[in-house]
Image (cartoon, rainbow, N blue to C red):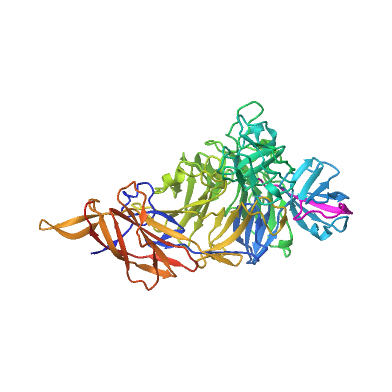
Amino acid sequence: MLQKIGFQPGINKQITATAAEGQWIDCDNVRFRYGVPEKIGGWNQLGNVNENELTGAGRGLHHFVNSLGRRYAIIGTNRILYAYSGGVFYDIHPIKSTTTLTNAFSTTNGSPTVTITFATAHGINPQDIILLDNFTTITGSNFSASDFDDKKFMVTSVPTTETITITMPSNESGSGATTSGGIRVQHYFPVGSAVQEKGFGWGLGSWGGEASNAVTTTLNGALGDNAFGTGGSGTSIVLADASQFPSSGTNFIKVGTEEISYTGVTSGTTLTGITRAVRGTTRAAHSDGATVTNTSDFVAWGEAASGDLVLEPGMWSLDNFGDKAICLIHDGEVFEWDSSLSNATDTRCTIISGAPTASRHMVVSTPDRHLVFFGTETTIGNKTTQDDMFIRFSDQEDINTYAPTATNTAGTQRLADGSQIRGAIRGRDAIYVYTDTALFLMRFVGQPFTFAFTQAGTNCGLAGQNAVVEVDGAAYWLSENGFFRYAGKLESLPCLVEDFVFDDINISSGNQMISAGLNNLFGEIMWFYPSATSSVVNKMVCYNYFDSSPQRPVWTIGTLDRTMWKDSAVFGLPHALDYDADTDTSFDVVGNTEGRTAYYEHETGTDQNKNGTITAITANILSGDFDITQQLQRGQVSGTATFRGDGEFLMKVRRFIPDFVSQTGNTQVTLNLKNYSNDTAASSSLGPFTITSSTTKVDTRARGRAVALKVENTGTGQDWKIGTFRLDIQPDGRR
């Protein structure tokens, strides 16, 4: 007989598939709306084609509308700060220093390396960004002045305190470059690493000796003085034996004095996903048979390494003070950019005079308009006095004045609970300030105290700077102790995927890469995080506050990997940043080795559109197992079955009738069959079944003690929202 199959909203991964009868247990790229699952909306890459792949990892995103009505997105990567408006990205990154050089460029025939020599110590580090201009004449080279002039380069290496190298896309074919004078080198303010790593004291990178009991082998093939692998091509290095080398996450080897990172091991001999000359080392040629050492776990000279030190990634705190974008480099300087200027997009950020020079986080307090710094200096301008628990705020309406007086509202405060301030966010009537252990409320009260501080919770600290959002007067955040909500009182947020998330999340050395995002169009709060084996964001967990109730919190999970997310308040649709760590091509930096970031508009269409190339968003949802029992009528077996039974009988599923609230294109339906809870589920022999908008029923020939329903799509132009399926099921004996 036909029976309706109903499921509660949300994903439950806290129990087994057998115990989750009548519930959904897994999904990807799916949301719940009005209690039923549907595929999420598509996304479209923003910016002009071929001029929209941003350099580095996106670590800051802020939207605002200025007084002229122009909408801006301020985007900070770990290398460059951009302003986005009208479909165009503008480089507004601040300049740290400008140096004019004479006859300072040299090249070597057959090499892409360009050496730049300074008259004095330059203070530049590998992977910093430089801008060259006033480059008019170059002789003895196949490179022209236009290959350098008004171009940005990522520094490849720093051989000495007076020299740096950059890498061109091709080799020098001339005799060697000679340049004229007056060339300017503009050094961008450094931001930090693309990823978060654990440090090992003096043993980090090339400073250390060898790791204790380090695995060694030899090269099976030579390496050239270039960015490639074995044989002078590709991104793989062949070793005599790689079977004992770490194979998950980002790892490191040392050949001579050069360190090389890799991301995988294949066939027991080959390192894949290599990046040459990392950790401040220089590329060099290495002969076949050269010694290769595992350096993923460097130690200090003769001492055990400490993994307690976490090297945080390069991040931004972004806000706006009226028309001015306020931009803070994490643990560094703070800058302003005036969007109201007629030539705003041709100008750069400049340092805010009088402001602290080292702070962990920053927020503009509204409506009172103070600029507030968290984890900042006790003595302004002295970075050695940075205190991770210290707060400093400006005078009202004056972002250049921080010294408290009897006639202004500038001031300071030090918090007591915790070891560092992790982040802060504006709420409806207060600023929520989070340490690693506690929540404080910072409320404007006026003179003489300006702000009052109240502790609102303990053992609820923020996991990372960006792991909190505020909506409708409530703050939601991810802590090392779970998910929390504050709306007048502290609440632990019930979560039916909590173990799944916290058993997998890289929270000890990836906490600062966790970011929260609000999608107010669908009542969703998302947290994007790196899994335990990943050095980059690759997972998502989502809480639906529209559909949730005290009896049934609605959560979903997935693989949507966004480093930053902003809701639809300014641009009408949500925007997000997506970091591709494995592709270095970017439109504005020559020699980029730190991956690239795409800027997407979400909830548009059904597919993903990357630079005009349309690919499918694959989505799926899987139910828990359900079984049957026979009914008795007047003491006799009726031959009918009851859904959600005791599993005493095998069942035969003869057909099912699909039901979709809406469907575009095709979907696939699979009936996963088991006889026992620990069995590996197997698809019915005729499945998966392709469902079109005109499909009325599907004959299945499925037989098992337990059945699970899976709905998915794999092609472009496909969209779906599930209704109530009906299955024709009957008992089929006990054996």
Pick whichever, 308 or 387, lies toward us.
308
Q: Classify residue 580 by image quadrant.
A: bottom right
**Is residue 373 among the parts visible in the rendering?**
no
At 32% from the left edge and 69% from the top edge, which residue is drawn? 697
Along the line of sight, the residue nearer the viewer: 54 or 716: 716
Q: Which residue reaches farthest top?
A: 302
Residue 288, position in %: x, y?
70, 41
Quadrant of the frame with the N terminus: bottom left
Magenta-colored span: 167-192
Residue shown at 60%/39% (left/top)? 241
Q: Is residue 395 shown left or right of residue 528?
A: right
Q: Residue at x 63, y 57 (%)?
A: 74
Is residue 653 depicted above or below 383 in this figure?
A: below
Q: Is residue 48 above or below residue 254?
A: below
Percent x, y of residue 176: 86, 51
Considering every residue shown, the one lying at the far bottom of the view is 694
Image coords of residue 499 (percent x, y): 42, 44
Q: Residue furthest left?
A: 634
Foreground of the two, 425 or 118 = 118
Magenta span includes 679: no
Left or right of 150? Residue 448 is: left
Residue 191 in magenta stretch = yes
